[in-house]
Image (spheres, helix red, strand yellow):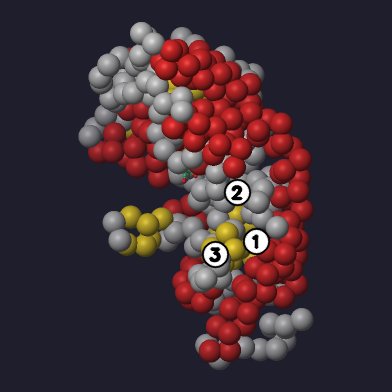
Amino acid sequence: MSNPIYLDYHSTTPVDRRVAQKVYDYMVHNFGNSSSIDHIFGDRTQEAIKKAKRQIADLINSSPQEIIFTSGTTESINLVIQGLQPSRIIISPVEHKAVIDTCQAMAKKGLAEIIWLKVDKKARIDFNHLEKVCSQGADLLCIMGANNEVGNIYPIEEIGKIAQKYHIPFLCDGSQAVGKIPVNFEDWGITFLTISGHKLYAPKGIGALVIRKGYRLQPLIYGGGHQNGIRSGTLNVSGIVGLGEACYLRQLEMQEDESAIALKRNHLQSLLQSKIPQLVVNGDTENRLAGNLHISIPNVPNSAIIARIRHQLAISTGSACSSATVSPSHVLRAMNLSDDLIEGALRIGVGKFTRDIEIEKSADIITNAVEKIFQLTSIYDADKFTRI
Ligand code: PLP
C-alpha cells in the first residue's frame, strides 16, 4: 500500500536527503566523540560541530558562541524557564504546551507568577496590553516566532523592542519560524531563541538554544560539564551536523521554497473554499506561515473527517493529546472560537516536498469526505454544499 499524502509539516518534516547523507556519514564513518581530545576521530567531530554552529549562526544572525545543542525546543524552553528561575513570567495563551506547562509547573510550586497576554479571535497579540504588563516589570517574556496551529507569524522585532525597553529577557520559541521566515537574533532583541531540527528538514531529537551573551542559566542536566556546563552529556554529533546542514540549506533555499509553498497552500485553500462554501479559515491570514492552512468546517466534526481520510491523507485536528485523552486545542479556546468551529478544526501543513498533484488530490479527498458526512447526517443541502 502506498503512503498517504503527507500534509502535516507543522508536526514534523521529512529529513532532506542531502541532510540525511551528512548524518549517515557522521554516524558510520566520522563517529568520534567530540570530547575525545587524544585522536583524530575526536578532532574531526569537533571541527564538524564548529562548522554546524557557524551554519546555524549564519541563518539566524547570532554568534556561534551563543549556541548550545539540546534535544529540541521542549528541552530548550525548559532550560530557559527553569534555568533562569524567573518570578514573574509574561506569556501568550497561544504558546505551545512546552512553554505553558513549564510555567504552570513553576507556578504550582510557588516559584513563579504567570501574567497572561490577551489575544484576539485571530490569535493576534494585543500590543497595548503587552506594553502595559511589560511596563509593570517581569523577569521573562515568552512569545513564539510562529504558531504551530494557526500559523500566525508574530512581529518579533517589535516585541523585542518592547522587551528591551523594559529590560525583560525575551524567550522566543523559534521552532516553527526558523528556516521558514527570516529571524534575526542579534538585531531583534531576542534573549533566548529555540530551534528544532525536525521542523526544518533535519532529524528529530536535535535542536539548539541560542543564549545572548551575558546571560547565564542554571543547568537542568549535570554531568561532564559539556557545553560550558549548561547542558552536560555527549554531544549528538550526527544530529548536530544534520541541523547545521539543514540550516545552511534553508538559508540558500528558504525564500524560493517558501514562495512555492505559499502558492500551493493558496491553491488548496481556493479549491476547498470553492467546494465547501461554509469553510472558515482561522488565524491571521495576513501574517501566516506559507505552508499553513487552518480551517474549520461548521457542523462537521474533525474526528469524522480524519476517520474517513486517514488512509489517504495525513492532516491533523491540532488537538493536544495528553495521556490518552484528547482535549480541545488551548490555542483555539484562547482565540475564543465557537465550539462549532473548534470541533470542525483541521490543521493542514504544506511543505517543500508537497507536489501540485498532491494538492489537487487532497482537495478531492477532503471534499468527498465532507460531502459524505453531510449526507449521512442528513443536513446535506445542495444549496449549501455544491460539488463542482
Ligand atoms: N513549540 C512549538 C511551537 C512546536 O510546534 C513544537 C513541536 O511540536 C515544540 C515547541 C516542541 O518542539 P520539540 O518537538 O523540538 O521538542
- Residue identified by numbered label 3: 3
- Rendered image quadrant of residue 130: top right
The picture places residue 326, in percent across and down from the top left corner, at 37, 62
Label located before the other in sequence (2 or 3): 3
Which one is in front, 24 or 302?
A: 24
Label 2: how many Cα within 10 Å (few below 14, some 14–19, many 20+): many
- In space, the residues marked 1 and 3 are separated at their CA atoms by 27 Å
- In space, the residues marked 2 and 1 are separated at their CA atoms by 11 Å
Left or right position of 285 against 92: right
Specify the amino acid type for callout 1.
Val
Specify the amino acid type for callout 3.
Asn
* Disc ID at residue 149: none
The picture places residue 352, in percent across and down from the top left corner, at 67, 48
Left or right position of 40 against 387: left
Residue at the far left in the pictured view:
109
* SS at circle 2: loop
Is the distance from the Cβ of mark 3 to the nearest ligand 1 atom less than 8 Å? no
Asked if residue 303 is positioned above or below residue 260 in the image, the reply reads below
Q: Residue at x 65, y 61 (%)?
A: 281
Asked if residue 255 is positioned above or below residue 310 in the image, the reply reads above
Q: Residue at x 56, y 18 (%)?
A: 51
The picture places residue 286, in percent across and down from the top left corner, at 72, 48
- Residue identified by numbered label 2: 151
Asked if residue 341 is positioned above or below residue 33 in the image, the reply reads below
Which one is in front, 329 or 15?
A: 15
* Disc ID at residue 281: 1
Q: Residue at x 44, y 53 (%)?
A: 330
Q: Is residue 154 visible?
A: no
* SS at circle 1: strand
Q: Is residue 315 visible?
A: yes
Asked if residue 238 is positioned above or below residue 16 in the image, the reply reads above
